[in-house]
Image (tube, coloured by chain):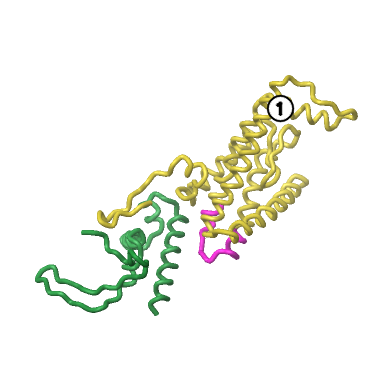
Chain colours: A yellow, B green
Amino acid sequence: MTTDMAEGRTEREGPTLGARLFRPFEHLAGAASLALGLAGILTAGFVGSLSGTYFDGVLDTHSGLAVPRAVFFSAGFIDWLSLSVVLWVLGKLASRTAFRAVDLFGTQALARWPTLIAALAALVPSLRRLSAGFAAQVTSAAPARPDLPATDFMFGGLAIIVMVLCIVWMVYLMYQSYAICCNLRGRKAVGTFIAGLIVAEIVSKAALGLVFRA
Amino acid sequence: MNNFPTSCPSCQSQLTVARLVCPECGTGVEGSFRLPLLAGLSPDDQRFIVDFVKSSGSLKEMARLLGVSYPTVRNRLDEIIARVRAAEGEES
């Protein structure tokens, strides 16, 4: 956003690719981000149900374990709500700006889009075989290295790296959402965000436990 | 016309007006006049304020005009408010 006083106009500049990937909330927030974000969470849940991947906690991704089908679709929403509510409370306490809940909840939903890529990465057959092999190893009385071809270790390993990078990217986007929507910077922003993330992780785990025990 | 300078190019202090001239008849007034509060802001901030007034104070309309999100516009406004308050503090 630049201004030319001599010409008397404000120029619009489209966001760069870097800005779209790492600072999308400078350009997108509110109801649009909420709709896109919820669609992303739902889609990630659907793809996760195909690859056996679920997000049982704000920062958790697990693959290859048998869980009820409802977990795939509801876990993402519970994670999103847990963190959004905790950050909303922290934002109200820490920020001097009167911010809109729809911006924070919407951008937090959009920040979970990398989980869709993580769920897609988990569709790689090598990773599924690798997960099954390691799961068998854990439950076996005499653990041994899974008997799989080297390509499974290579492609499965690559898929795991992609999934980890997606989680890192997601956390970065969650922070960006919090900092922009609540107008917080520096140590105050980082400190309250980390505290919020830890509390939300516990809240989401507890909520998921309550929902699926009932 | 050149952009209006607000700070000293040598020491960055706020400039004051020493002479005003009528462009029609050439009459000049000399003295030491303080710049109006908003004139002390950067051209970007001044343009933002003009656009904000023209948008009837609607942050949503400003977001649409600038192609950015609502919180980005609101944060920019908060920064300008802080600068205006700081300038008011310097004046008083």
Please state which of residues A170 and A2 is positioned toward the viewer in this rendering. Answer: A2
Quarter occupied by residue A136: top right
Give the chain of mark 1: A
Q: Determine if the magenta segment contains residue A73.
A: no
Give x and y (percent) for residue B89.
42, 76
Please state which of residues B23 and A173 is positioned toward the viewer in this rendering. Answer: B23
Mark 1 lies on a secondary structure that is helix
Q: Residue furthest top?
A: A149
Check disc 1 and give the amino acid type.
Arg
**Mostly what secondary structure, the magenta segment?**
helix
Give x and y (percent) for residue A41.
59, 41
Q: Which residue is mark 1?
A: A128
Q: Is residue A48 above or below residue B28?
A: above
Q: Residue furthest right?
A: A141
Residue lying at 75% horizontally and 34% vertically, measured from the top left: A65
Quarter occupied by residue B74: bottom left
Give x and y (percent) for residue A157.
68, 29
Q: Is residue A127 above or below residue A196?
A: above
Please state which of residues A121 and B9 is positioned toward the viewer in this rendering. Answer: B9
Q: Is residue B67 above or below residue A152?
A: below
Q: Magenta stretch?
A: A88-105
Q: Would you say B21 lies left or right of A180 here? A: left
Residue lying at 68% horizontally and 41% vertically, measured from the top left: A55
Q: Would you say A146 lies left or right of B21 here? A: right
Residue lying at 33% horizontally and 62% vertically, measured from the top left: B46
Residue lying at 33% horizontally and 67% vertically, measured from the top left: B8
User: How many marks do you count on the picture?
Assistant: 1
Q: Is residue A45 above or below residue B6?
A: above
Q: Determine if the magenta segment contains residue A93.
A: yes
